[in-house]
Image: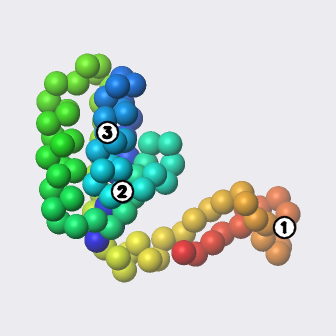
Amino acid sequence: MVILVTYDIGDTRERLLVQRLCKDCGLHRVQRSVFRGVISARARDMLLTGLAKMCRHPRQDTWDVQVYFISQDDFANHLRFTSQGKTADSEDQPEIKVL
């Protein structure tokens, strides 16, 4: 099971706490406010418990964390669009990489 965590948190201190929790649970940063990984059931429980505790008393109104559970098979079929390469058809189109 792949876990994907996305967040929009206005308070810098709280945002850093969520980032630290994600890293401590074994997730890896994918983008500025996105973490992803395959983690144990124990780490998943620690992540969900930690997030639940943090969101009870947010310092600001902007506090949105979303956690997605994606099967390995579904995740294996995802597409990635990147500007790192070009397609053979056109230099103006981004390359599509199937991971």
Q: What residue sits 66% from the left and 60% below the top?
A: 82
* Image position of 82 (left or right of 33): right
Q: Are marks 2 and 1 in contact (CB under 8 Å)?
A: no
Alpha-carbon span between mark 3 and mark 2: 11 Å
Determine which quarter of the picture holds residue 17: top left
Alpha-carbon span between mark 2 and mark 1: 36 Å
User: Quarter holding the C terminus?
Assistant: bottom right
Q: Earlier in the sequence, mark 3 or mark 2?
A: 3
| SS label for mark 2 | loop
Alpha-carbon span between mark 1 and mark 3: 41 Å
Mark in the foreground, 1 or 3? 3
Percent across and percent down for residue 89 are 83, 73
Which residue is labeled 3 in the image? 18
- Residue 40 visible? The answer is yes
Determine which quarter of the picture holds residue 43: bottom left
- The correct choice, above or below, for 85 with respect to 53 in the image is below
| SS label for mark 3 | helix
- On residue 90, the disc is 1
- On residue 27, the disc is 2
- Residue 10 visible? The answer is no
Q: What residue sits 85% from the left and 63% below the top?
A: 91
The kind of residue on which mark 2 rests is Leu
